[in-house]
Image: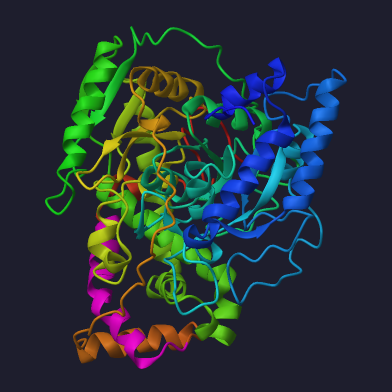
Amino acid sequence: MPELPLTLTDAAAALRSGEVTSLELTEAAIAAAERADGPLGVFLSRFDDEARRAAQRADDELAAGTDRGPLHGIPMGIKDIMPTVEGPTTSQSLVFDRDWGDGHEGPVIARLREAGAVITGKTTTMEFALGLPDPDKPFPLPRNPWDLSTWAGGSSSGSASGVAAGMFYAGMGTDTAGGIRMAAAFNGVSGLMPTFGRVPKSGCLPLGYSLDHIGMIGRSARDCAVVLAAVAGRDESDPDSVDAPFAVPEPQAPDLSGLRIGVVRDGHFPDHGDPATATAFEAALARFEAAGAELVEVSLPYRAEVMTVHQITMTSEGLAYHRPDLHKRWDDYFAATRWMLAQGALVSGADYVQAQRVRRVAQHAVAELFGTVDLVVCPTASMGAPSYADLSGDITALGALIHTGYWDCIGNPVLAVPMGFTASGLPLSLQIAAPAFGEATAVRAGEAFQAATDWHLRVPGLDPGTAVEPPAPGAMPAADPAELAAVRVLFSGATLAPAEGELQAFALGYPDVRTAVAALYAVPEARYADPALRFVAGSRIVDWRR
């Protein structure tokens, strides 16, 4: 077999030149899965035979002169919250109804098939695309191919680690709190969260209705753009989707002259982050400047408030969906999933409405920011992939090192690209945010950066090695009795019945929840903001409910 291309874009060109066949690409992907899927936990189900048949069809069609586009014959992985006809969707959960989807596929999967993509299997996620891995549940623990003692990130874990490990050229994922970008960052590949509404999300299990984005993971910025072009555009089944198809920009010289890039440092380099992040970020900025871009220092409007809005919105919308099952099957949920969903019981309906008002104010402020700059860049996370030992520690401190949720709440498109490595050899990542529907500009900047660097072309050794089992969580201090009593009342009203130890954990964090919520009511300009349009990324540009 010839040496195979590394990127989707190069594989598509090689298919058309006759240097390689889709069947050869697919067999290589299957061989990579056979070699390393066990320790990495990339797949929940593999469709080897179906993939081989799809690859053969693609080869036959290409030989006959039928070319469906750059995804024709390309092996892809699908996050297991999107139904496909080859097998059941599990959402990596004991609770989830295996008949959900009933053999039907959403518009994104239908568009991938029309484009000729070869679907190789369903990839691991966090349960219902939320939370953290749970070693007590009978599902693979998604591990990072750069270091098996570390997490692959979430929630689009397998879609990112599978691209990094060569098990497919692109993976479909979702991003509600950073699920595409965080996983891409930790695995050293590229990930694109499109503008909210540009890709229809119907036919995908919801987490936060007004936050969910379907997006893509590939090795390069152009790989992500190619997939976006195949799946973007309105579908009647999703009232939030808009008539905004996407065309892959023509390749151009890596010249960013005339581009004004806002640089965000504030809040993105906490003391407990990895110092290599700052070094890599400054080196990345130098690359943009060398390509001709003008760099200006900016801050993210209402950053702290937006992070509270994001938490309230995601947990409230998630609890609304899961409350009946949480009431009946609390213990069947992953520990971190039920903990995060139940946070929605700690806020009121009024709090949710106020959060949407603040969200509107922040969205307008971000639109004004993009009136002064063309792009905004910041680290995707202030660290490399956390170890499984870290996941059993202070999750709040860990969450402060991940800088993705802000943009889910605002809804603008964001591209994550590799920008270097930590001292221990774990990938680091840069986010490039653009105005609403400005994916082409983000891709242009990402391509210019990747033309000057090879971080996205680095490949992990794929030595299965020895996976380290996550440790048990440590002891927890006792909560204040008054806080515990208040939380008990709230959960009783929501008909949720956590164990006493879990109630203690909720009570310990409840004062911080109240403080953060109170800050939202202190935003005076939010009092008269109209929350009727539940989501408007750059509301001066498009009415999302038309």
Q: Position of residue 524 (x, y in %)?
A: 27, 48
Q: Which residues are magenta?
A: 497-520
Residue displayed at 36% across by 24% down: 375
In this view of the protein, can residue 529 be seen by the observer?
A: no
Residue displayed at 53% across by 41% down: 166
Is 411 part of what is drawn in magenta? no
Overall secondary structure of the magenta section: helix
Which residue ends up furthest to the front in the rendered image? Answer: 1
Q: Viewer-proximal residue, 523 or 242?
A: 242
Classify residue 21 as left or right of residue 380.
right
Classify residue 69 as left or right of residue 449.
right
Residue 392: name its quadrant.
Answer: bottom left
Q: Viewer-proximal residue, 347 or 277?
A: 277
Q: Which image quarter is the C terminus in?
A: top right
Which residue ends up furthest to the right in the rendered image? Answer: 64
Q: Viewer-proximal residue, 125 or 327?
A: 125
Is 514 part of what is drawn in magenta? yes
Q: Position of residue 127 (x, y in %)?
A: 53, 67
In this view of the protein, can residue 121 be seen by the observer?
A: yes
